[in-house]
């Protein structure tokens, strides 16, 4: 779908690696940060044409993902946050809105924690902020996960933009290790977030509804939306995309309403 939407692409040198990015549309800047194991297109390909009608979209691919280089370090949400901020400074962008999905939502919240001066508003979709907030059986699955468990759509998307199967395997292994070793966001970190936040969760997501409600109560200026469906279905994420989907299935109006609201 995004093949019909014009965009500019490039690479920026950030913290020792070359980071790939795409820019769509015009207007107030909105940064899109994809999920783990993903590319720009697998997370956001269905909603980019909608959001770019009114926004300047800065879409990134994080360390080891898609077209962005890797470094000889494990993946971390803190480093991803610093990388995105370095890219934004490189592009002469400051005080932006951010939409992150899944691991990208964790990165978005780390930007709010580590670089509050860069954040106007943050939307974090399908995040897992506490280990004990995951659905029953999630950690058993993660501890036994192998490359074969990686969705084929993710593999295909990676190889389409970076035809290196070794890098694909490395990316998968690093993503798995990051989740297995996931550290909680502390209550103090969440309570210290200054910008307005919208948490979006599916009612059949990685974090339980009870957990995401509790997390929303820790963040001072936070709104919460729980949407029927699976992990990312509300934005047309590729692994939960329904056949014969309609754009009305997506929460773009909800996102736009939150972003357009005046900050008190």
Image (cartoon, rainbow, N blue to C red):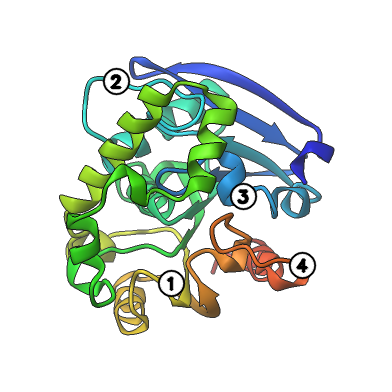
Q: Residue extending furthest right?
A: 4
Mark 4 or 3, closer to the camera? 4
Q: In the visual, does 49 lie left or right of 205?
A: right
Residue 26 seen in the current view: no
Secondary structure under the numbered disc 4 in the rendered image: loop
**Do the CB atoms of the residues marked 1 and 3 lie less than 8 Å apart?**
no
Distance from the alpha carbon under mark 3 to that under mark 2 = 25 Å
Q: Which residue is mark 1?
A: 222
Q: Which residue is mark 4?
A: 244
Secondary structure under the numbered disc 2 in the rendered image: loop
Distance from the alpha carbon under mark 4 to that under mark 3 = 17 Å
Instruction: Determine whether 94 is above or below 116 in the image.
Output: above
Q: Report the front residue among 149 and 56.
A: 149
Q: Which residue is mark 2?
A: 71
Q: Which tag, 4 or 2, sits closer to the chain's start?
A: 2
Instruction: Determine whether 262 is above or below 175 in the image.
Output: below
Q: Answer few, some or many: residues within 10 Å of disc 2's Cα (few below 14, many 20 plus, some between 14 and 19).
A: few
Question: Which mark identifies residue 44?
Answer: 3
Question: Which mark identifies residue 36?
Answer: none
Q: Answer few, some or many: residues within 10 Å of disc 3's Cα (few below 14, many 20 plus, some between 14 and 19).
A: many
Distance from the alpha carbon under mark 1 to that under mark 2 = 34 Å
Q: In the visual, does 37 lie left or right of 22?
A: left
The location of residue 240, given as percent across then percent down, is 56, 64
Quarter of the image holding residue 22?
Answer: top right
Q: Answer few, some or many: residues within 10 Å of disc 1's Cα (few below 14, many 20 plus, some between 14 and 19).
A: some
Distance from the alpha carbon under mark 4 to that under mark 2 = 40 Å
């Amino acid at each position: 779908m995004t093949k019909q939407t014009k965009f500019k692409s490039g690479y920026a040198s950030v913290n020792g690696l070359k980071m790939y990015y795409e820019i769509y549309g015009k207007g107030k800047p909105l940064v899109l940060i994809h999920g783990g194991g993903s590319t720009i297109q697998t997370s956001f390909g269905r909603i980019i044409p909608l959001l770019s009608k009114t926004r300047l979209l800065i879409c990134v691919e994080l360390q080891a993902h898609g077209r962005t280089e890797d470094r000889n370090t494990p993946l971390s949400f803190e480093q991803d946050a610093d990388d995105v901020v370095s890219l934004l400074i490189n592009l002469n962008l400051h005080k932006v809105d951010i939409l992150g999905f899944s691991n990208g939502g964790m990165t978005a919240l780390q930007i709010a924690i580590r670089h509050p001066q860069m954040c106007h508003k943050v939307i974090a979709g399908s995040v897992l902020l506490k280990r004990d907030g995951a659905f029953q059986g999630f950690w058993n699955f993660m501890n036994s996960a192998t490359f074969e468990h990686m969705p084929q759509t993710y593999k295909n998307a990676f190889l389409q933009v970076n035809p290196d199967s070794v890098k694909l395997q490395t990316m998968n292994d690093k993503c798995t290790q990051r989740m297995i070793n996931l550290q909680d966001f502390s209550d103090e970190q969440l309570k210290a977030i200054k910008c307005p936040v919208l948490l979006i969760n599916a009612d059949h997501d990685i974090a339980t509804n009870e957990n995401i409600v509790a997390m929303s109560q820790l963040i001072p200026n936070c709104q919460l939306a729980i949407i029927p469906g699976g992990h990312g279905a509300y934005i047309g994420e590729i692994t939960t995309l329904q056949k014969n989907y309609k754009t009305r299935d997506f929460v773009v109006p909800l996102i736009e309403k939150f972003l357009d609201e005046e900050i008190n």
